Amino acid sequence: MLNDQELLRYSRQILLQHVDIDGQLRLKESRVLIVGLGGLGSPVALYLAAAGVGELHLADFDTVDLTNLQRQIVHDTDSVGLSKVDSAIRRLTAINPEIQLIAHRTALDEDSLAAAVAAVDLVLDCSDNFSTREAVNAACVAARKPLVSGAAIRLEGQLSVFDPRRPQSPCYHCLYGHGSEAELTCSEAGVLGPLVGLVGSLQALEALKLLVGFGEPLVGRLLLIDALGTRFRELRVKRDPGCSVCGSSHA
């Protein structure tokens, strides 16, 4: 049940008929893995903690650098040199001491990633490289766990939801295959802080919709964001029957 402090803390979203008490209880009982605590993972972690997701699993092997602070808003100047996981835990605990925070401070290999995905209800990919995204996607397909995937570079962002519980849902590999032009990192190409904040906030929104069970998640749809012109475009994405990750011969 929700205690009096929780009822007060979450009162504004409990007022929404799409959430209500039952939805808030579902959030409290949910477990979520956030892979990457950088520009995307920062708003994701902040909003999910504030919303009352009961257990957040935080995965990042990096430390906070001064160059991160322009966009990675879960960290601050005093966090420079600290583990990003420890920095995030400090901030999230200050925001909401009611939730549980599980740390993954080292790089996840195939086995540890599979175990981390199996331990949660939903995964958010907030990483910044294609190989990690592919590995996270494969683990989610194998464990049949929904994946909210976001990316941002320069002045462009992308967002989609892949849900292997739904027969018609594509996976990340269906969309990008064996490669992606987004191999450039922010340190090489640059990125504007509010853009990653926007994509990360939308990832958090999609996660809340999936966990509570309301609205229409971005399954089978790719949202493209053009920050330069403040334009949004949506593309339909179909499942590839021959996909080497989620295709019928591999399911």
Image (cartoon, grey):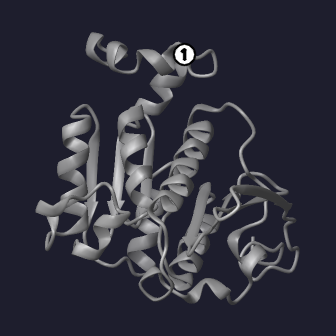
Crowding near the residue tagged with mark 1, few <14, some 14–19, many ≥20 C-alpha atoms within 10 Å: some
Q: Is residue 103 left or right of residue 50?
A: left
Q: Residue at x 20, y 58 (%)?
A: 76
Q: Is residue 50 left or right of residue 80?
A: right
**Vertical position of residue 20 compared to residue 181: above or below:** above
Q: Quadrant of residue 79?
A: bottom left
> Would residue 61 be seen by someone viewing this image from the given angle?
no
Q: Residue at x 42, y 33 (%)?
A: 51
**Vertical position of residue 19 compared to residue 240: above or below:** above
> Would residue 177 be seen by someone viewing this image from the given angle?
yes
For the C terminus, the image quarter is: bottom right
Q: Give the x, y percent position of residue 120.
A: 46, 52
Q: Give the x, y percent position of residue 4.
A: 28, 10
Q: Give the x, y percent position of residue 115.
A: 42, 66
Q: Residue at x 35, y 55 (%)?
A: 57
Outermost residue on the top side: it is 4
Q: Residue at x 62, y 37 (%)?
A: 209
Q: Quadrant of residue 133?
A: bottom right
| Amino acid type assigned to the residue bearing label 1 in the image | Asp
Q: Which residue in the structure is indicated by mark 1?
A: 20
Q: Secondary structure at mark 1?
A: helix
Near-viewer residue (248 or 208): 208
Q: Is residue 66 left or right of residue 243?
A: left
**Vertical position of residue 151 compared to residue 232: above or below:** below
Q: Quadrant of residue 177?
A: bottom right
Q: Give the x, y percent position of residue 206.
A: 61, 45
